[in-house]
Amino acid sequence: MNVIVFASRKGGSGKSTLAAHLAAQVHKPTKPCLLVDADPQGSLTLWHKLRGTNEPALKVANRSVSEIIATAKRDGVEWVFIDTPPNTSAVVEDAIKNATMVIIPARPGVFDVDAVQATIQSCRAARKPYAVVINGAPARRDENESRIVALAREALAKFKAPVWSGQITNRADLLLALGEGEGAREFSASGRAAGEIGKLWAAIERSIKAIRGQTSANGAMHKQAA
Ligand SMILES: Nc1ncnc2c1ncn2[C@@H]1O[C@H](COP(=O)(O)OP(=O)(O)OP(=O)(O)O)[C@@H](O)[C@H]1O
Ligand SMILES: [Mg+2]
């Protein structure tokens, strides 16, 4: 079982959005995914209600996630995705302690990039692999990334933070899908949003395989300094 934790002290960076889209994409009855909403704001819970299928399953965590994780392991869950609140409270620390890998979404602004440091510190203190994912970025033009994304990468490189080489672009489809209780692929399988979520998932899977010692860590995003 692998536990992916979405964490960032910064509100609105995309934790709940990425958790929902990735879970919708990854869940299979044969390899079930469990969503854990550890944020009292309840964004993931709202999406799950809109979805109305109970697939993937969702559990709400208040103070600790450990018990939920132990039960999930017994139940044969393959992936656990934990959405956390925008702070460094005890439940966030507990989720990070239980993580196989931590995903830190960050919008490419100066305040946003600066704010990832607190979460990076928590990951380093817990000795957990992590990667920053640039989210809500302006679209690429002719395959060139926007100046603000390039600047964000430069700033993140100063913290020696591993950063995914791709980006999740600011796209209405991602929002529209959430409003329908869907993931990007369910909403529009051939859309660009689904393409980016698919690439992010491939990068996460590569990292997990490397963390588990099944492949070499060369090029894995949790090792890739910006
Ligand atoms: N790539 C994107 N394109 C378009 N909208 C986005 C994108 N990422 C996030 N959003 C929207 O921005 C808002 C904030 O995102 P989200 O709620 O996922 O952030 P969060 O980190 O979970 O916030 P919080 O810390 O408050 O829980 C939401 O309305 C979300 O749907
Ligand atoms: Mg959220």
Image: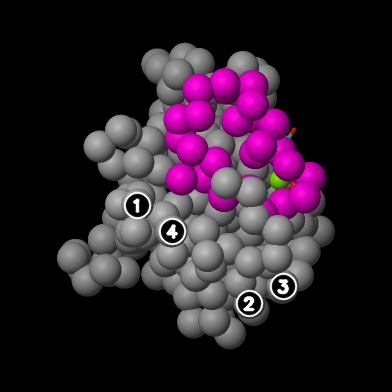
| Mark positioned earlier in the residue sequence (2 or 1) | 1
CA gap between label 2 and label 3 equals: 11 Å
Give the residue number, with chain letter if any, for mark 2: 122
CA gap between label 4 and label 3 equals: 20 Å
CA gap between label 2 and label 1 equals: 29 Å
Q: Secondary structure at mark 3?
A: helix
The dot on residue 217 is: none
Give the residue number, with chain letter if any, for mark 4: 71
Give the residue number, with chain letter if any, for mark 1: 75
Q: Residue furthest left?
A: 214
| Mark positioned earlier in the residue sequence (4 or 3) | 4
Q: Amino acid at mark 2?
A: Ser
Seen from the viewer's position, the closer of residues 140 and 35 is 35
| Mark positioned earlier in the residue sequence (2 or 4) | 4
Answer with left or right where residue 162 lies relative to residue 218.
right
**What is the x, y in percent for residue 19?**
55, 43
Instruction: Judge whether residue 161 can be spotted in this image.
Output: no
Q: Quick check: is 50 in the magenta stretch?
A: yes
Give the residue number, with chain letter if any, for mark 3: 90
Q: Amino acid at mark 1?
A: Asp
CA gap between label 2 and label 4 equals: 25 Å
Q: Residue at x 57, y 21 (%)?
A: 52
Q: Amino acid at mark 4?
A: Thr
- Badges 4 and 1: C-beta atoms under 8 Å apart? yes
CA gap between label 4 and label 1 equals: 6 Å
Where, quadrant-wise, is the N terminus in this rendering?
A: bottom left
* The residue stretch that appears in magenta: 34-58
> 10 Å neighbourhood of mark 4: few (<14), some, or many (≥20)?
few
